[in-house]
Image (tube, rainbow, N blue to C red):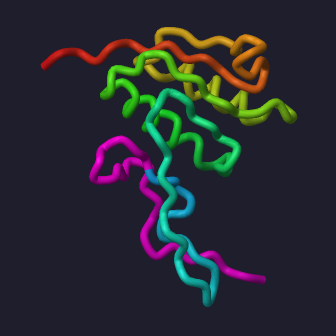
Amino acid sequence: MRKLEVSNPPSPERVTKSGNVLNHAHLWGMKMDGEESPPPLDLPIDGVLDLHTFRPNEIGDLVPTYLEQCRERGILQVRVVHGKGMGNIKRGVEAILSRLPEVVSFREAGAHYGGSGATIVNLRPRQQK
């Protein structure tokens, strides 16, 4: 059995120097015994979050962080692509969204935007300081 070693715990909050990408959390600093750590992958903050490459246990931190990064950039409508499958990821995303005060509403995407495999999220604008 191979053990998973985490040299630096994943941090979905890591943003590159350009400030417009979020590191792919589950690849940051993780390696299998005897393997080199893969470089982090960049995830664009563009209003579309595709969860296909993430593990189910990562969405609890990833979704709120991504939505906050979108709000900081003035992106107030986000499409979360979770896939159709058995619906477990979709239900998890909906449970997260229902607990976030910055979420005004969410609904299933239209047929041209992913249908039941995606959720459209409307966010509150950030308060001016």
Vertical placement of residue 118 versus 19, above or below: above
Q: Residue at x 65, y 20 (%)?
A: 119
User: In the rendered structure, which segment of residues is drawn in magenta?
Assistant: 1-22
Q: Report the number of numbered marks.
A: 0
Looking at the image, the residue that sits furthest to the left is 129
Q: Residue at x 64, y 49 (%)?
A: 54
Vertical placement of residue 93 versus 9, above or below: above
Which percent across, then down, holds residue 43?
50, 46
Vertical placement of residue 28 versus 75, above or below: below
Find out whether residue 29 is within the magenta segment.
no
97 left or right of 69? right
Q: What secondary structure prevails in the magenta region?
A: loop
Near-viewer residue (49 or 60): 49
Q: Quadrant of residue 69?
A: top left
Find out whether residue 14 is within the magenta segment.
yes
Quarter containing the C terminus: top left
Near-viewer residue (128 or 60): 128
Q: Residue at x 59, y 23 (%)?
A: 79
Which percent across, then down, holds residue 89?
72, 35
Looking at the image, the residue that sits furthest to the right is 86
Which percent across, then down, holds residue 13?
38, 48
Q: Residue at x 42, y 70 (%)?
A: 8
13 left or right of 109? left
Quarter containing the N terminus: bottom right
Near-viewer residue (72 or 98): 72
Which percent across, then down, holds residue 100?
47, 22
